[in-house]
Image (cartoon, rainbow, N blue to C red):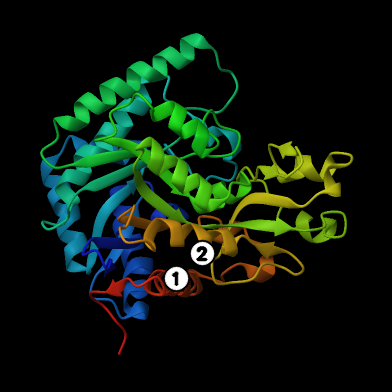
Amino acid sequence: MRLRHPDGQVVHLSYCTNVHAAEDLAGILEQLDTYAVPIRERLGADVLGLGLWLAAPVAAGLASDGAARQRLRSALTARGLEVVTLNGFPYQSFQAPVVKYAVYQPDWTTPQRLAYTMDLAKILTDLLPADAVRGSVSTLPLAWRDPWDAARASACRRALDELARQLHQLPRPVRVAFEPEPGCIVETTAEAVALLGEADTDVLGVCLDLAHLACAWEEPAEAVGRLREAGIPIVKTQISAALVSEDPHRDAVVLSQYAERRFLHQTRGPHGLSADDLDEALCTPGADEQPWRIHYHVPLHQPPVPPLRTTVGVLADALREIAGGDTALCDHFDVETYTWNVLPPASRPDGPAELANGIASELFFARAQLTALGLAVTQGVPS
C-alpha cells in the first residue's frame, strides 16, 4: 500500500513474507496466491506491498537469471502486488523447526553474506515499480556478539566498503539497512551510529525494528534524534511489537507458553537483565524482580495471553518520531510478525485463511497508525 506524507513523499507499507516457509520460486508463487492476494482483497487495496523474503539459494538463482526475474515481476504485477523492500536478514531455513542462533549465520565477516545481499539488491532493481524512488534491503547488524575480535571487526569494515561500492554500480538506487537487535554487535542506535559513522550513508543506513528498539529500553525520541543528528538514514522501519511482563514472577506460567523451540527470544530488563532466551530468563534466579521486554514479535492488533502486554505504546511513539513530523524520516514501513505459527495454541491461526486475516488486521492497524499522523492513503481505500 502507498500513503503520502504531508511533505509530498510517497511512503510504502508492506508485510514481510518471512512468516511463510517457502524457499523456492514455485513455493513463493504459491504463497502469493494463498496469502498475499487474499490479504490485498481483505484490505480493499489496488496494490499490496510485500517485504519479500528470498532464501539464499532462490536469490542466487534469480540473480543469475534475468528472465526468471521478469517472470517474478510479472507474477507480482498480475496479482496486484509490488516490492520495494526485501528482508535479507535470514539467510535460509527461517521457518525450520529450530532456528535460534543459526539466523545470524553467515554473518558480515563472510563473503557469503555480501554475495547474498548483493544478489537481493540486483533482484530488487528488476522488481521495483517504475515510479519507485529506491529500494531497500534489510540485513543483520554485522554478527552475533560472540565470538568477536579485531580481525572480525576489520573483515566487517572491508565488507561494508565493498558493499557500498557495489551498490553504487546498480542501475537503480538500492540502500542496505542494518537492523540493531538484542545480543548482536549492534544492539542499540548508539552502536548503529558508531558502526555507520564513517560509512557511505548514501547507500547504507539503519533498519529500525520497533520491537528491538523497545527491548533495548530505548526512548524513541532519543533514539530517532540520535540517528538524525548523526546523519544516519532510517532506510526501513519494521513495524513490530514485543512481549511485556510487568511482573515476571506472577506471570511465569503464562510466559512459559511463549518459550518455544524455533526462535530466539532475547529478554531484557531495565536494571541489567540480559538473557539470550526466554527459557534462560525464566530459570535465572532473581531475574523476575524487574519488568521484562521479550524479543517475541506478537501480532500488532491482538492482545497476548493476559496479563501480558505488548510494546505497542513504544511503536506508536516511534512512528510519531519517524513519520509524524514535517518531513518523513523513512519511506519504507514493513509489518514483520514472523511468529504467528509459534504463538501459544489458543492464539495461533487455524490454517492459511486465518493467517491471511490476521496479517490483514495487522496492516489495518499499521495503516491506521500512519493515517493518524496525517499520512493519506493514495490507493486501495476500502469502500
Q: CA distance from mark 1 to mark 2?
A: 7 Å
| Residue 226: x %, y % from top left | 46, 41
| Amino acid found under the numbered disc labelled 1 | Gln
Left/right of residue 354 with respect to residue 266 in the rendered view? left
Residue 316 image label: 2
Residue at 37% x, 79% y is 42
Label 2: which secondary element: helix
Left/right of residue 182 with respect to residue 112 in the rendered view? right
Residue at 68% x, 51% y is 293
Q: Looking at this view, is 270 or 103 the one in front?
A: 270
Q: Residues within 10 Å of mark 1 (few under 14, many from 20)?
A: some
Left/right of residue 67 with respect to residue 147 in the rendered view? left
Label 1: which secondary element: helix
| Residue 274: x %, y % from top left | 71, 37
Q: Looking at this view, is 182 or 100 the one in front?
A: 182
Residue at 37% x, 57% y is 333
- 161 is higher (above) or lower (below) than 17: above
| Residue 264: x %, y % from top left | 62, 42
Q: Looking at this view, is 79 or 97 the one in front?
A: 79
Q: Earlier in the sequence, mark 1 or mark 2?
A: 2
Q: In which image quadrant can residue 99 be found?
A: top right
Residue located farthest toward the bottom when viewing the structure as drawn: 383
Q: In which image quadrant can residue 12 be found?
A: bottom left
| Amino acid found under the numbered disc labelled 2 | Ala
Q: For the C terminus, which image quadrant?
A: bottom left
On the question of residue 106 being in view, the answer is no
Residue 369 image label: 1
Residue at 24% x, 47% y is 135
* Residues marked 1 and 2 touching at CB (< 8 Å): yes
Q: For the N terminus, which image quadrant?
A: bottom left
| Residue 144: x %, y % from top left | 55, 28
On the question of residue 350 being in view, the answer is yes
